[in-house]
Amino acid sequence: MSIQNSGQYFYAESAADIEEAIKAFPEVADMKYFRQSVCKCRHAVFRLYLDEDAGYCIRECTRCSYRHVLVDGEDLQDEAVPELVMCVCDFDQFEVMGAVSVYDDSPDDARQFALGCRCVGCGIAGVYATWLSHWCGDEDEPGWSSYLAGM
Ligand SMILES: [Zn+2]
Ligand SMILES: [Zn+2]
């Protein structure tokens, strides 16, 4: 047992436990594939700038400051109004994991996306955003895989 449900919060010991925390959220219980965000510098702790309504999130590496727009959000930057994500403990640095569900009749394609985060200050992990993916793959790669490649 590596996450603890303490009232409304889940305390996770490591980034790997974010998957368990996501699965514990009823709204996204059908998530099937998971991928942790790792910067090109190999660091995996980020500040996040999120606009859930737009389906848009930037991660900013806390070591090298490289910024990356998650999954398919690149086209949304003109309409999105991202805000810095803060934990309830007032810290702003997270390990990040994306998850997708798939369609019953199209198990290669991404249906819904969930953004799971674990605060590295206090260990609280949870789902910070969800949105519809509607992402289809091609003959080379299934949609869930190419969608999560953008984590
Ligand atoms: Zn980096
Ligand atoms: Zn925290």
Image (cartoon, rainbow, N blue to C red):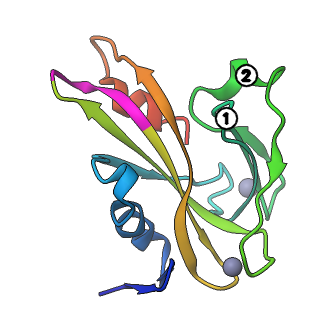
20 in relation to 90, above or below: above
Question: At label 2, which amino acid type do we have?
Answer: Leu
Helix, strand or loop at label 2? It is helix
Looking at marks 2 and 1 on the same chain, the residue that comes earlier in the sequence is marked by 1
Q: In the image, 20: left or right of 122?
A: left
Which quadrant of the structure image shows residue 63?
Answer: bottom right
For the N terminus, the image quarter is: bottom left
Q: Residues within 10 Å of mark 1 (few under 14, many from 20)?
A: few
Instruction: Look at 84% across and 20% down and name the residue there.
Output: 78
Question: At label 1, which amino acid type do we have?
Answer: Asp
State the count of labels. 2
Which quadrant of the structure image shows residue 76?
Answer: top right
Which dot, 2 or 1, sits closer to the camera? 1
Q: Which residue is mark 2?
A: 76
Q: Which residue is mark 1?
A: 53
Helix, strand or loop at label 1? It is loop
Q: Does the beta carbon at disc 1 come under 8 Å from ligand 2?
A: no
Question: Which residue is at the front of the view, 93 or 6?
Answer: 6
Percent x, y of residue 27: 39, 51
| Magenta range | 105-112
Q: In the image, 86: left or right of 9?
A: right
